[in-house]
Image (spheres, coloured by chain):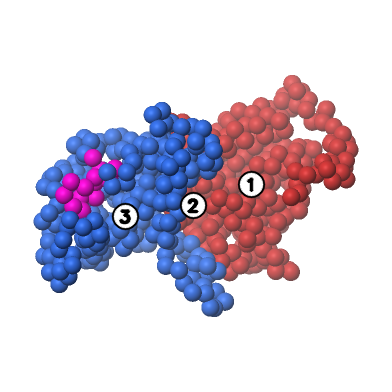
Chain colours: A red, B blue
Amino acid sequence: MDCRVALCQMRPQLGVIDSNLKAHHAWLDQSIAAGAQLAVFPELSLTGYFLRDLTQEIAMRLDDPRILELIARSHVCSIVFGLVEESSDHRFYNSVVFAEDGKILQVHRKVHLPDYGIFEEGRYFAAGKHFLPVESKLGRFGLLICEDAWHMSSSWIHFLNGVDALLVPVASPARGIDTDEPEMSSQKSWRTLADAQALFFQTWVLRCNRVGFEDGTMFWGGSSVTSPFGATVAEAHAEEEDLLVYHLTSEPLKRARIQTPLLRDAKPELVRVHLARLLEDPDALRVCEP
Amino acid sequence: MSKLPPPPGCNVALTERVLVRFLREETQRIGMTHAVLGLSGGIDSALVVELAVRALGAENVLAVAMPYRESHPDSLRLAQDSAAHAQVQLEVADITPMADGYLANNPDLQDTSLAAVRLRRGNIFSRLRMTTLYDRSAQNHALVFGTSNKTELMLGYGTQHGDMASGINPIGDLYKSQVVALSRHLGVPSAIIERPPSADLWAGQTDEDELGFAYDAIDALLFRLIDRRQSRDSLLAEGFAANFIDSISERVRINQYKRLPPLIAKVAARTVNLDYRYARDWGT
């Protein structure tokens, strides 16, 4: 792995696809000008986040000409962007597309849909079922959308798939100002999470958050790059649009995995045995059932 | 309730940044550049005017003081101090002729020894102020900035379609104690910060007398009840008295109607706000 990645910390307009598409092209221009080979956009970057009943109205099929126009630009710079994807059987997914060389390499449909607090994704979206690695010319990537990253199992699957970097488009709302901490509680949690994932799974973690307000809720930005040693090595401005460009290489991955060979020593077969037992034993499953 | 836990803290620098961005972005995205707000001489509106000038620039903020002839003279003087500190234009719009016109036609509103009459008069004054602000809003193409804090909203301590009415409200998620902390940070004149909070709807009224509890105690309780979703048992264990927890909890419940738009009888397939659901910022 040896590539320059741009995290496009943008402010989408809520439900205004044409304007957001234009913005994507402009951010892509900037990324290319900065020498990036991969541009990553936030979750639902083409649509905005609190869509509610707009969800179905602004959904797009993957062969939508507007999407194809964006994908066509991935010859110069690979692109990861977010949209509401309508499947051929009219299910609606919170998806990100990884496009490269003018083609879709992979679509990741968000698996873990938050449906609590201010979130109501379970009401509107169908859940994805897979965590598959993206075999890109730039490296092997694992895609996680926001809440996916809060379930360690998601990153663990990517870890076992041997990814070099986790790409995590998010739409993280700012909340928690009731302490003297220098940052919001949501900001602190995400930093802890990214550091821990990088440390446990010895991978680059690239989180791209959006900015701007929707109905009074602020998305706080602060997109970041975490090294395979679990240290935040680059961070975009909080709260403002920003382009963060970072050069990823294999060297720290190799050093981290020599220093502590967690991937070599992982025991997925042992987990399989335990999981099988848990899934077969109704008593052991009490935590999952009423 | 001698050793109650403290009210919630507040990261004032961070909160200032978020609220200023909120006012700027939520105003400008609907094509507006100006704001109007009422200045009462109290801490809530003094804080909002400080935030408003940081968001939009002092030249784009119109403050309106709306005294009634029975208002405490300190209220207008402190509103003037607040406007001067924020360097905004202050209009004084006396509501006395409007209010007295209404009161003269309603003789049962004369006997202010009756609590119910005081409350009705207070609501009338509050709604006449709202009428004035919304007219100024149309006159100046300016968005009305709200000044109700979270403590008031939770307790329903405000007048529906009166002081609770606004276009956008920067401090509705801040408890009173957090309003005080942020006001200190932004340099709100100390005479305003130290003045006992009052709606000034009748002579000698103070919020804490009327509510029956001190704001710090109420905020300590509400923060744990609302934000942390603590159980009654854990609140008792922290030293809150049972009658305090229960009376505040009940007050929060019975005032839920004030925090929501009116109920609509559902008869159609899609009903406003029930299953016709769009963000207000839709399309911006």
In the picture of the structure, the residue carrying the numbered disc 2 is A11
Mark 1 nearby-residue class (10 Å; few <14, some 14–19, many ≥20): some
Front residue of A197 and B252: B252
Question: Left or right of B219: which side holds B271?
Answer: right
Question: Left or right of B196: which side holds A117?
Answer: right
Residue for point 65% across, 52% down: A113
Residue A139 image position (x, y, % from top left): 72, 41
Q: Is residue B3 magenta?
A: no
Mark 2 nearby-residue class (10 Å; few <14, some 14–19, many ≥20): many
Q: Is residue B205 magenta?
A: yes
Disc with the residue nearer the chain's start (2 vs 1): 2
Q: Are marks 2 and 1 on the same chain?
A: yes
Front residue of A208 and A98: A208
In the picture of the structure, the residue carrying the numbered disc 3 is B158
CA separation in Å, label 2 and label 1: 20 Å
Q: Which residues are magenta?
A: B196-208
Residue A194 image position (x, y, % from top left): 62, 35
Q: Chain of mark 2?
A: A
Residue B42 image position (x, y, % from top left): 23, 45
